[in-house]
Image (spheres, rainbow, N blue to C red):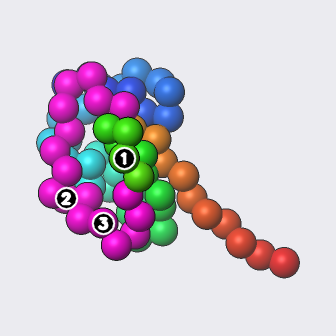
Amino acid sequence: MKIKYQGNDEETAATTVAAFLAGKGVNAKTAIVEYGGEIYGAESDLAALSLTDGAELNVFNIVSGG
């Protein structure tokens, strides 16, 4: 299926948000995910979110330091 990831068109066989992110090497436990106009944090069950053709997915990592 085709989705938009970080503003770019992507082709994927993943069926869930969690599977797609794992394939990209993204640690879902430290990422903020925007999917379908909703925001999901580390406590969210991304394996329960099904990807759909044409979906838009953006991922943000919060970095702190001093």
Q: Which of marks 1 and 3 is in front?
A: 1
For the point 42% across and 46% down, which residue is it? 34
Counting from the top left corner in percent of width and height, residue 65 is at 77, 75
Q: Mark 2 — residue?
A: 47
Q: Look at the picture and state if 26 lies above or below 12.
A: below
The one nearer the camera, 26 or 49, is 49
Q: Residue 20, can we see it?
A: yes
* Residue type of the residue flagged with mark 1: Glu
Counting from the top left corner in percent of width and height, residue 56 is at 36, 31
For the point 48% across and 68% down, which residue is it? 30
Helix, strand or loop for disc 2: helix
The one nearer the camera, 48 or 28, is 48
Instruction: Tell me: 64 left or right of 32.
Output: right
How far apart are the two marked residues, 2 and 3, measured between alpha carbons? 9 Å
Q: Which of marks 2 and 3 is in front?
A: 3
* Residue type of the residue flagged with mark 2: Ala
Question: Which residue is situated farthest in the front direction here?
Answer: 37
For the point 71% across and 72% down, which residue is it? 64
Helix, strand or loop for disc 1: strand
Counting from the top left corner in percent of width and height, residue 40 is at 38, 58
Magenta part of the protein: which range?
40-56
Q: Look at the picture and state if 6 lies above or below 32.
A: above
Instruction: Using a 10 Å C-alpha cutoff, classify the residue at mark 3 as few (fewer than 14 neighbours), some (14 to 19) or many (20 or more).
Output: some
Q: Which mark is residue 44?
A: 3
First in residue order: circle 1 vs circle 3: 1
Residue 26 sits in quarter: bottom left
The N terminus appears in which quarter of the rendering?
Answer: top left
* Residue type of the residue flagged with mark 3: Ser
Q: Mark 1 — residue?
A: 38
Instruction: Tell me: 21 left or right of 51.
Output: right
First in residue order: circle 2 vs circle 1: 1
